[in-house]
């Protein structure tokens, strides 16, 4: 926030300078002199506005170097006004209100979203935003000075705290001036804004008889009357020059919330927030507005409340708004900050409502204390209860005597039921007790001998591995991979490999065993014991193990090549082409030449045409023409060339170059394919030294091409023709057979 304030004025002035071609002088120049020069140029632009330029110059004469800030802002605003005369007219008040709103939201004043294309609106937005931010920071500094009496808490000296520290220090200056009995309106050159803050803090604690200078005249309302004999309203003695009201004697006054400007006619808004003259309570923030101010709450109202236009917190009636979560059987009742869900159905006497709103019976015999009289027993009914007369009832372990007058003890040990089930029985008055055997314990509640679970009572102390409880005792057992020792409690490792559980190799480990396989095999995922052959050819990389075909064998694999034209390389995986021509295994005739290609060979021969003689193994030269026109049009030389390459060679690959053995300045060379390129697989291109032939289309199938490539050379006005017979053998790219395990 502070960064925006520190750079705003300079940025605005720079923008204005670019528009009107003004240069920025060094910091050593007099600011007042620079501003006067700029206003001189500005007055020339404002000659159509009448006396506006005179007011500018007059106002400038009353500005001290310490109050240059407002003038610079005014100058920049007028520059923006001139610049935006041709743009779309936008309300300046709306631009300022937008800037003030964004300043209150603490947005970056240097990069506000524009609401108009006008530069004037942009400048007004920026300056109004900066003013709000400076006012808020200055108010913070004044409050710190008033509350703490010191500015030590504002220890940092960054751009963000510069304005806050300045207002805090100036307020302390004003309070010190008042405490020492000095006049609040001193002549210290502390700057315009600092002087305002200092005087405001000084006057806040000054005595009632201290008066303000007449230059700050304020009036309470617009309907001003001045007592003059009969209290009649004065006529305008100021000739209409006052912006607000005339108070007589050619003196102007301002309404409440305004102060008179130095020109003695215009009125400027008083920033009550900047001067600390607001009455905002704690938790509220002062926001200045034209002629007054308002207090805005800083903290939200909380759940269940909403902020009204009067800045008060009002309860939200969730029931009326329909934002409650009461069910269908409940009724919503609003309360302060919340609401309650009350059941719609009312239960009768003897019933109570549960959480779902349903009525359930009340058990009065349990919920009430002594609902019946002595000698009676309570019997619950639906919605009520009954009291019945109590009959003689002997407790457990007693029965009525023969006269049915009293209760006597029952000897359970002598009864027909075997109460202790094989254990000793001792009769007691009203009860009995069992003498339990080893491994049992007597349960006084169920009065039986119950088995003692030794494994649970002594965990980890009886058995090394697993403990299994039995009636009256326990027994130990071992986990898989171990066997019980002779002591019946410890466990020894069991060597499972002795029974040959694995199909190949077995390694005994403590408590278990591990099967592993030899090279070329892998352990089965099903039983973890069987070794299965690894099909190397079917692995993700199997397609690259062999260059032609892969054959899987138990525990290994081998590669093979095509039956003819290839042989297996020394690495056992790659296939090498057999040069039948060099090996002498070709079938060419004596008058034919052998030409090796990938995976085979070609038998080649040629005969020179009429009027040509053979000049080598692959060249025919033209005989003398004897001034015959047809003969002279024939090529001087016919040369045979043989090329071979695999399919799918990249397009635009140069495969043949043709040109004169030496070049002479002024040579005109042309090259073209005359025959054999009907499908357009090749193309020619001229280069400085002759021409080249390249692949024009992708050749994805084996094919033989018989191309005639003609070169025409114009040298010293004479045209010579040369013909190259190019045989191109396109062979299948290195063959590869996809792996099929069913063919193995």
Image (tube, rainbow, N blue to C red):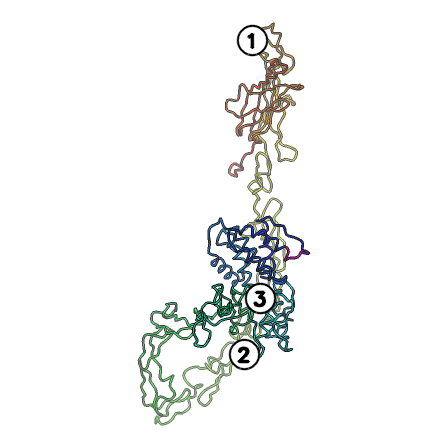
User: Within 10 angstroms of label 3, few (less than 14), some, or many (20 or more) residues?
Assistant: many
Where is residue 118 shown, x and y percent of the image? 50, 52
Which numbered marker is on residue 137?
3
Q: Secondary structure at mark 2?
A: loop
Q: Do the CB atoms of the residues marked 2 and 1 lie less than 8 Å apart?
A: no
Decide if residue 345 is on the left or right side of residue 678.
left
Tell which tag, 3 or 2, sits nearer the viewer.
3
x, y percentage for residue 284? Answer: 51, 71
* Few, some or many residues within 10 Å of mark 1 (<14, 14–19, 20+): few
Specify which label sits upstream in the sequence, 1 or 3: 3
Q: Is residue 10 shown left or right of residue 307?
A: right
- The residue labelled by disc 2 is 438
| View extreme (top): residue | 626
Residue 721 badge = none
Q: Is residue 30 magenta?
A: yes
Residues drawn in magenta: 28-33
């Amino acid at each position: 926030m502070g960064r925006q304030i520190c750079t705003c004025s300079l940025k605005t002035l720079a923008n204005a300078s670019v528009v009107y071609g003004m240069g920025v002088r060094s910091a050593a120049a007099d600011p007042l002199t620079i501003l006067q020069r700029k206003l001189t140029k500005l007055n020339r632009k404002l000659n159509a506005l009448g006396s506006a330029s005179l007011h500018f110059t007059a106002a400038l004469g009353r500005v001290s170097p310490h109050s240059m800030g407002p003038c610079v802002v005014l100058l920049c605003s007028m520059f923006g006004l001139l610049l935006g005369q041709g743009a779309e007219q936008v309300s300046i008040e709306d631009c300022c209100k937008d800037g003030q709103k964004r300043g209150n939201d603490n947005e970056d004043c240097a990069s506000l979203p524009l609401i108009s294309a006008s530069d004037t609106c942009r400048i007004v937005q920026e300056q109004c935003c900066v003013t709000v931010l400076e006012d808020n920071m200055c108010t913070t500094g004044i409050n710190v000075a008033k509350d703490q009496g010191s500015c030590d808490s504002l220890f940092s000296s960054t751009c963000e705290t510069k304005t806050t520290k300045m207002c805090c220090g100036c307020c302390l200056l004003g309070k010190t001036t008042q405490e020492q009995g000095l006049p609040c309106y001193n002549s210290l050159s502390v700057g315009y804004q600092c002087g305002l803050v200092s005087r405001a803090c000084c006057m806040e604690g000054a005595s009632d008889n201290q008066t303000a200078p007449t230059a700050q005249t304020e009036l309470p309302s617009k309907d001003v009357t001045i007592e003059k004999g009969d209290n009649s309203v004065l006529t305008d003695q100021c000739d209409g020059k006052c912006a607000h009201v005339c108070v007589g004697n050619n003196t102007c006054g301002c309404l409440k919330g305004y102060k008179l400007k130095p020109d003695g006619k215009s009125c400027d808004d008083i920033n009550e927030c900047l001067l600390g003259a607001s009455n905002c309570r704690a938790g509220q923030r002062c926001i200045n507005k034209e002629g007054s101010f308002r207090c805005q709450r800083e903290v939200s109202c909380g759940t269940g409340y909403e902020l009204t236009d009067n800045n008060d917190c009002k309860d939200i009636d969730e029931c009326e708004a329909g934002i409650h979560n009461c069910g269908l059987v409940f009724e919503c009742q609003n309360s302060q900050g919340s609401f309650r869900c009350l059941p719609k159905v009312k239960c009768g006497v003897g019933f109570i409502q549960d959480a779902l709103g349903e009525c359930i019976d009340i058990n009065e015999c349990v919920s009430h204390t002594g609902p019946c009289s002595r000698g009676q027993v309570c019997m619950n009914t639906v919605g009520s209860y009954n009291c019945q007369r109590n009959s003689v009832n002997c407790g457990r372990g007693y029965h009525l005597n023969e006269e049915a007058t009293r209760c006597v003890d029952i000897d359970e040990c002598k009864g027909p039921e075997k109460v202790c089930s094989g254990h000793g029985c001792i009769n007691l008055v009203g009860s009995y007790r069992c003498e339990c055997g080893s491994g049992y314990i007597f349960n006084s509640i169920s009065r039986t001998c119950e088995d003692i679970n030794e494994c649970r009572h002594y965990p980890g102390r009886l058995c090394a591995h697993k403990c299994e409880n039995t009636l009256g005792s326990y027994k130990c057992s071992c986990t898989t991979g171990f066997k019980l020792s002779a002591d019946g409690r410890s466990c020894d490792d069991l060597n499972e490999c002795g029974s040959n559980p694995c199909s190949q190799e077995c390694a005994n480990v403590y408590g278990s065993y591990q099967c592993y396989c030899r090279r070329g095999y892998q352990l089965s995922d099903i039983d973890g014991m069987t070794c299965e052959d690894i099909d190397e050819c079917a692995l993700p990389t199997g397609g690259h193990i062999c260059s032609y075909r892969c054959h899987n064998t138990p525990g290994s694999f081998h590669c093979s090549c095509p039956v003819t034209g290839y042989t297996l390389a020394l690495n056992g995986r790659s296939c090498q082409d057999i040069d039948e021509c060099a090996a002498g295994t070709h079938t060419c005739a004596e008058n034919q030449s052998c030409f090796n290609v990938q995976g085979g060979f070609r038998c080649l021969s040629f005969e020179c045409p009429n009027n040509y003689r053979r000049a080598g193994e692959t060249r025919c030269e033209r005989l003398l023409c004897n001034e015959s026109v047809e003969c002279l049009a024939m090529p001087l030389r016919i040369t045979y060339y043989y090329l071979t390459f695999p399919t799918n060679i990249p397009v635009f690959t140069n495969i043949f170059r043709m040109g004169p053995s030496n070049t002479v300045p002024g040579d005109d060379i042309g090259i073209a394919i005359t025959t054999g390129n009907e499908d357009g697989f090749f193309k020619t291109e001229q280069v400085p030294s002759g021409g080249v032939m390249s692949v024009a289309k992708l050749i994805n199938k084996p094919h033989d091409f018989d191309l005639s490539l003609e070169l025409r050379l114009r040298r010293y006005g004479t045209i010579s023709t040369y013909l190259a017979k190019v045989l191109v053998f396109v062979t299948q790219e290195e063959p590869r057979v996809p792996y099929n395990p069913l063919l193995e």
